Image (cartoon, grey):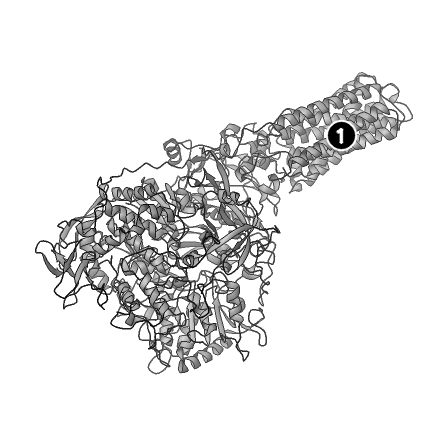
Amino acid sequence: MHPAFSIIFFTITSGLGYGLLFFSGLHVALGRTGNIVEPSSNPLVVCVVIGLTLVLLGLLSSTLHLANPKNAWRAFFRFRSSWLSREGVFALLTFPIVFAFIYTLIATETSSVTSKTTAIILMIISLLTVYSTGMIYACLKTIRAWNSPLVPTNFMLLGLLSGAITMFAILSYHSQQSELLLTLIMGLLCLAFITKAIYYYFIGKPSKLSIKTATGLSSQKVRLLHTGESSKNFLMKEFGFDISVKKVLLLRFCSILLMVVVPTLCLITQSTSFHFILIAVICNFLGLLLERWLFFAEAKHVVNLYYGREA
Amino acid sequence: MRLGLVIDLDTCVGCHACVVSCKEWNTSGTTGSLSDQNPYEKDPTGVFFNRVRSYETGNYPHSKTVNFPMSCMQCEDAACVTVCPTGASYKRKSDGIVLIDQDKCMGCNLCAWACPYGSRELDRESGTMKKCTLCVDRIYDESLPEIDRQPSCVMTCPTTARHFGDFDDPNSNVSKLTRERNGNGLMNELGYNPTNQYLPPRLASSITIEKKQKSLVGQAKDWANELISR
Amino acid sequence: MTAQICPQNIDLEDPLPVFEDRSNQEVKTTTCYMCACRCGIKVTLEGKKVRYIQGNRNHPVNKGVLCAKGNAGIMKNESMAKLRSPLRRKPGTERGDGEFEVISWDEALNELTARLEKIRETDPKKLAFFSGRDQMQALSSLWAQQFGTVNWSAHGGFCSVNMAAAGLYTLGQSFWEFGEPDWDNTKYFMLWGVAEDHSSNPIKIGLSKLKKNGAKFATVNPVCTGYQAIADEWISIRPGTDGLFAIAMSRVLLENDQFDKEFLIRYTNAPHLVIQNPGKSNDGLIWRNEQGKPQAWELESETFIDASLAEIKPALFGEWQTSEGFSVKTSFTLLTEGYLGDEYSLDKVSKETGIAAEDIERHALEMAHVAFQESIEIETEWTDWTGKKHDKFIGRPVSMHAMRGIAAHSNGFQTCRAIHILQILLGAIDCPGAHLAKPPFPRMIPPPIKPAKNMAANTPLQSPPMGFPTSPEDLCIDIDGKPLRIDKAYSWEAPLANHGMMHMVINNAVKGDPYTIDTLIFFMANMAWNSSMNPGNTQNLLREKDDNGEYKIPYLVVVDAFHSETVNFGDLILPDTTYLERFDTISILDRPISEPHVIADAIRHPIIDLDRDVRPWQEVMVDLATRLKFPIFTNDDGTAKYSGYKEFITNWEKHPGIGFLAGWRGENGEKSIVGEPNPDQWEKYIENESFFKQDIPDSQKYYRFANKEYLEFAADTHLNFNDKPIVMEIYSETLQKFRLAGQGLYDGPCPSDEEDKARLKKYFTPCPSYYKPIEVELTDEDEYPFSTTTQRPMFMYHSWDSQNAWLRQIMAQNKLYMNRAKAESMAIAEGDWVWVESRIGAIKAQVKLMEGCEENTVWTWNAIGKQSGAWGLKKGANESEKGFLLNHLISELLPTDNTSQREMTNSDPITGQAAWYDARVKVYRADDQTPISFPQFDTIKPLPGAPDQPSVLRYKTHEPVNIVRPMKDVLTRGKNPR
């Protein structure tokens, strides 16, 4: 698949934003706000505001991918069948829920039932939205590399991971710490690494589909002779992306390094230093960019089979 | 009704008549125009609903060439309809034709991602997705003579490799052809239940031959003459 | 076409809007001209633009279907390459530099008329007028005849004259527009060397029918694409060896005693006796009695007898002594002796062709089985030429079709004759299920027209410039045996050059061999590019000047509709219209559109208005003819006889009652084929969907060469020249006469040049023979191991469609196709750039590997490679930057051993057919893989007034009527699509 930067940016920033929202909600729901909430400053509010801004930024970025954005407002109407619609609706619902949450943070006791309930709703909507984003890709049987429960799982885990590290950085900036968050981050780093590894194993398996199954021609060997167009058409521009195995392995390595390894080292050794946490955030983000880029680049649409290519 | 096409791989010679006929009808049709980029320079490209690809099976000298037209399969379980967020992509209840409402499409490409057959293309000029409409703007048009109420590609095909009809009617030409010639949809395993059916190339029957037992008789002048009147 | 379902949209669940405003639309019928198939089309106009083009169901040629090209007519009309006005090369600029100034038609025609007048009154042969994408050969030939120059031909000499000539000298008809398989009834069809043909839609319709009927379709071709894809059996063959295959199969039939003896005896010259008198002037001639009748040996009476009599029982085989001191053999004996010779053993043939010996035998016996064991009968009463009545037609349902893969070789004439002999042995000519003639064929063998030789100032030729020589006396040569024509057609170099040799004109004119000319007019012929061999050199020849600084071809007039590479070289450009913008005739006198059982002709008329200063070339020819006061175009008092083309077509008669258009003749339009001129004839055609057709009655449909009713009808209507039965020629006495001349024995003109003699002796065998293509014979096959061929794609017609925005998207770059295994053994991978080298040059191209390619052949698509800037394409277009021509590797001259040897044309020695596919090359991977083809040429400048090419097209004739999905449905429809 041709990696479109606007979509890559959208899923990452959106995931990150929802991660921030989720963990903000988690702290309130578990009543573990501890010294995080103080009259003078409220890092949780900062997290939530940044989170929502990133979600908004992501949404706007996704519209850049649209060829006819004036109809973007219609995207909410097919909730009944379309994951993109569902994601849109959930994203839309996020706003009032976040406003409500901020209100509970500022105007009420964070330990009140209202706060905790709002927090739980916020967590649910965050997960639902990121899950929906993942399902947009995972429901497509045409792209084997996407058609797996591992995809929404990864989206959620990586969104949570990046959100958690970012929240950790914001707290650190405000000279706050959360043991809970640090533990969860370490857990997420492991989980993310494991599920990513399983995913790469999974998409490395040979496909059952071939030019023979695509065309239904049962002869021993089937080869493309002519595509019927001599320059790249829409299909090949969108789906005919080439990347060498060497490049894939290199980028996977760099991605894991930046996304998982460097943040792990930073947080194990220097969990109290803002600068190291910031390095972790940035590296994790860059690693995520690579991961998401590869997510597209490595995905082969089944229509490629009709073009004599692999899928 | 379940309208669709039967494509006969046994008689398609890859002439591209259907490709161009579709283009010319539809560029002024219900989702027109079908734009072209770089029409007179390097790497021309444009929106076509129907494309013909060619494949070779087997190895030289026993290889066979198969020409393979593909356009929207009008699937019963069309994924492109399921994934469309705006509802622009939909399947008509009465005849099963899958259409794209040009007023609603936002050009997100998701339907193209969902379609395994490459049936949908983005028209950069309108920013919307376009595809074969099964000539819905021809087949019901009572200002056309009845015999012309067919998809343009079907009317034009010089080798009668394209047929149009109702698959819900077991006596229609398309239903009969599919039965008689073991027609199949493409990539059925993906579960989209394509309506268009493909008829595989026929195997030729062999011809018996008669050989004379005697070998070549000496010289021509020794050959016998038969008495045959002019 | 069977009617497809027309569903009733009574379901208001999915209502539809009105899509087309019919009140703003008009449907007109005319004839397509995206190629020479000339299908009937219906053009829907909306306002001034073309909304839609479709096939006309009522038209006999295409019956409603239409190919990719026909469907792309809109974009032909929108082409950026359309010429817009007459042009003159700017004085002081060089030819080929593309510096032109716009002039008016008056200026252009005054200039041309003055020049032509001068030529006509001094030395008419100084005008050479040759036409390429010709549609009205009959008119342009007539024009040249009236002018008084022999230097005219159409393009058949570089196209496929071998097909036509072989058929006309053997059967009285041929393939292509002369004849066609009986698609409805055939049970076995063999296709030879056909990629795409002018009869393209009929072939497609026919193939579909025969596949449905379960007939076997075998194809002989070095490449497996197109029609070959749907063949039951693909027979891969080494190019140029098809003659061996045909002869070998014939040999199998002879050896297995499976050939149609009745057919041979009744309808051919197989029983005719041939004089065996070596060293004498009558050796090898048909033995005739005092009345000139050929003789045969009557078996019952055991005497010699007039072979043309009915009710005799002549021998097919045998040799007898005559009282005149020589023996005679039957033609068939000679044929058989030749075919049973050692050089045609199956093993030898297998080695040369690449077809396994057992397969050669099997193919022949399969055809024989179908012909004789599965013959068909059509119950109809008919009368043969003897007056005998029959109650049925017996059909041997084996049919064939052949085209340029056979023709474009220096052995193509003999090969095509060999195919015809094979058909005759199977009895499969003009009978049910077999090969059917298309009116006005079958005709006398050959037609009794001799090419004109004598020219005089201001005097028309006494006969057409093209004709059918039957002996050395008919050649267009002077007392010393030197050619009279600029292309050397009908000289010892190419005696039966029935379609001229357009590909030699530039070379000969510049070399002054046989003489220099003054004015060269090319109509619709891209001689400076893909229609020439060695185009780079040809362009240089056009630029060549003599010692005085004058161009060796002083004045070049290019008539074309589009900005071709050749237009760039013109001194005067006369722009033609497109096919939607003019009146035109597709006449029986010309290249007819008849089907086997339907006599037909057609017209074109203007569908859209002209938007630029161009004129139909036919109009201009009539205009020039009138200005030059050609007798046919001038009244006795010197005034113009015709006001223009339309009036000329309606009123001119070739014979009393016979004109260009056969339909609606007679005062009231009530007569067909023969009748007085009808002033409203054009209107009648337009009212009747632009074509005329007349069905042939059932009793006249088959065996027309011997069908009394048909022969009389054909004579009465001047379709044929007399009503005599047509006797097919297994043995060609015409060829034998020329062979005798080569031996110095002929009682008449003989060549004096040793090389001419050698060619006549070797190649002019009266029975078909095989010889290695001449170029191949002179080539080191180890150094140049690959044969090369081209083919036309189905979606492009020669050079005409890269200008078409839709069609060029299908293919804007042609590749060099190679057999995959072969390429891999040479370390050439898919997509590599390779050098292809011949004895005259090298090109660089990109490969595409495939299975369906004979291992020792490389090929590409015809004419897609373009010169940068031509055809309305911008610099950098794939056609010029990456596309290529194989032409650069082929020379119009054969290699010579030393300088004293004459430069001989690279053509078939019998007909002068350009031997494109004889070329031999070597291929190797290029070190420099830069993706640009070689050679590259300078970018052609845009013409004055040429429009800027848009970077986006959004063609439509009205605003689209979108189908709106109700919001209620959007919101309430469930998860499932329906």
Q: At which x and y percent is residue C360?
A: 32, 44
- Name the kind of residue labelled 1 in the image: Leu
C297 vs C516, left or right, is left
Tag 1, which secondary structure?
Answer: helix
What residue is shown at x 38% (from left), y 33% (from top)? Answer: B181
Q: Residue A49's image quarter?
A: top right
Residue C480 against residue C319 in the figure, above or below: below
Q: At which x and y percent is residue A59?
A: 72, 35
Q: At which x and y percent is residue A253?
A: 72, 31
Can residue C58 be seen here? The reply is no
Furthest residue to the right?
A: A40
Query: Callout 1 environment at 10 Å: few (<14), some (14 to 19), or many (20+)?
Result: some
Q: At which x and y percent is residue C805?
A: 54, 54
Residue C548 against residue C506 in the figure, above or below: below
Residue tagged 1: A257
C353 vs C537, left or right, is left
What residue is shown at x 33% (from left), y 62% (from top)? Answer: C762
Q: How many dots with numbers? A: 1
Camera-side residue of C922 and C220: C922
Can residue C824 be seen here? The reply is yes
Camera-side residue of B117 and B172: B117
Quarter containing the N terminus of chain C: top left
Camera-side residue of B16 and C119: C119
Chain name for mark 1:
A
Residue B170 against residue C822 in the figure, above or below: above
Camera-side residue of B183 and C945: B183
